[in-house]
Image (cartoon, rainbow, N blue to C red):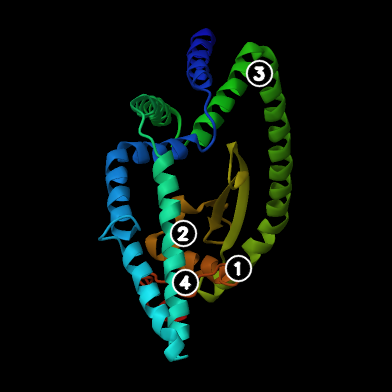
Amino acid sequence: QRNRERAFLEFEINEIETAQLRPGEDEELETLYRKLNNGKKILETLQSVRDLTGYDSAQGAGDSVGMAVRELTRVTEFDSQLESMSGTLQEVDSLLNDFNRELSEYASKFEFSEEEFKETEERLNLINHLKAKYGSSVSDVLAYCESKRHRIEQLNDYDAYIKQIEEEKEKALKKVERVTKKLHDVRNRYKTVFADEICIHLKELNFLDTRFEIHLKDAGQFSANGKDEAEFYLALNPGEPVKPLENIASGGELSRIMLAIKTVLADAEDTPTLIFDEIDAGISGVTAAKVG
């Protein structure tokens, strides 16, 4: 099974490494692909804009603005207020001239290459294929590859890997046993205090000669609550041995016992309101009044 996993991982790593990916390469290629895919439209638009704004066309805005500058300059000597408008128009002429020069430079450098377009498309398809298998970005794909290299190192030295995780397990087990023992000691120390407080409230609920105890036993496995299993024991009459609460208490008695337990825990639990369903069922007289 390790050999099969190793062979599969080597295939995946080789597939990724052969591609020689660079972080961010997919975004660069997508931008270039959009540009090349729309190359004809870009060139046509550039030519149209150059015709509309240029200086070598009768319809070009450059020629029109240049003529306007010359016309306005001839009359500025007759009114000084026209000088500021003439200056503004000359700035427009200068900006338009700069724009056309920049536009011409871009157009002269822009070349559509069928070979470059094909190479870009093939490279982008390869990257998208790898992203579909190994991650949503090039960085994710490279991180996936690195994690699989680490896994191969584990498989190549499997005995050492098993020994390492067994040691980690042993450390974790000792730690959880230490914490569980500490938790058990706290429970053991306070179970009598807790039970005595419950007994006080039980007497207020007309359990006059009741004994209440909490027994702790090993649950046999760890959980978020430790390794203890707590069970409530109760004796309702004098001279009787305590027995598991679930075996001897009636429904009405369980309601009153739960009320006593919740009263003791009220300060510790963040429960502002408790709702009991027919807590007075099966009781009457003085007991019902005390429960109320």
In the image, what residue type sits under mark 3?
Answer: Ile
Q: Residue at x 36, y 27 (%)?
A: 125
Considering only order in the chain, which callout, 2 or 3, is on the residue closer to the N terminus?
Answer: 2
Q: CA distance from mark 2 to mark 4?
A: 10 Å
Q: CA distance from mark 1 to mark 2?
A: 77 Å
Q: Quadrant of residue 234?
A: bottom right
| Callout in the foreground (3, 2) | 2
- Would residue 93 appear left or right of 159 to someone viewing this image? left
Q: Position of residue 237 (x, y in %)?
A: 53, 61
Give neighbour class at mark 4: few <14, some 14-19, many 20+ (Cα, 10 Å): few
Looking at the rendered structure, which numbered label has been put on residue 98? 2
Residue sitting farthest toward the left: 59
Q: CA distance from mark 4 to mark 3?
A: 77 Å
Q: Position of residue 112 (x, y in %)?
A: 35, 33
Any part of residue 189 in sight: yes
Q: Position of residue 257 (x, y in %)?
A: 49, 65
Give neighbour class at mark 3: few <14, some 14-19, many 20+ (Cα, 10 Å): few
Circles 1, 4 touching at the beta carbon (< 8 Å) = no
